[in-house]
Image: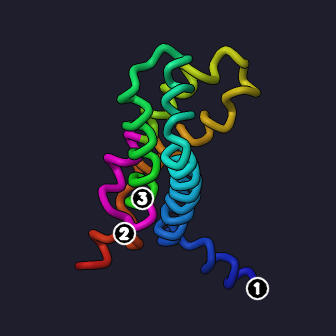
Amino acid sequence: MQGKIEKFYHRDNHDVADFLIRLALAIVFIYHGWGKLHNMAGTVNFFGTLGLPVYFAYLVAFTEFLGGIMMLLGVWIRPVAWLFAAIMIGAIAFAKGSHGFAGYEFELTLLIASLAVAYLPVGKFSYRRLRG
């Protein structure tokens, strides 16, 4: 039994862990990006209430949605992870920070997960590694 457990926790399983973190990020960002795109008028209005220019609403919505798809497929993983991190820093700074830790704990989790992906080596479950 101990041998099977040790085999499961082999150090080469970092590829699986990398993919699971990317999958979680992709699902969340695709969902939220689609929500922003689907209600672009509301998104633009919300960004306006934060004092941000209209183009930020479009930039964030498209980055979340398309970046989530790219993250899922394993394409441009690190640049997308850095963009996600920047978006989360902006979300905390402009929208959630004044609510205290309980107001931005989710965004902080996404920020840290995005930074982890940005610093991890590209795993074997990515487009670049699968194509050879």
The mark lying in front, picked from 1 and 2, is: 2
The mark lying in front, picked from 1 and 3, is: 3
What kind of residue is marked 2?
Answer: Ser
Give the spatial CA distance, label 1 vs label 2. Answer: 32 Å
Quadrant containing the C terminus in the rendered view: bottom left
Badge 1 or badge 2: first in the primary sequence: 1
Of residue 53 and residue 124, the one placed in the foreground of this image is 53
**Residue 78 lies in the magenta-colored region:** yes
x, y percent for residue 111: 53, 37
Q: Report the residue at 38% width, 40% height from top.
A: 83
Pointer 3 residue? 71
**What numbered label is drawn on residue 34?**
none
x, y percent for residue 58: 40, 37
110 left or right of 132 in image: right
How crowded is the residue under tag 1: few (<14 C-alpha within 10 Å), some, or many (20+)? few
What kind of residue is marked 1?
Answer: Met
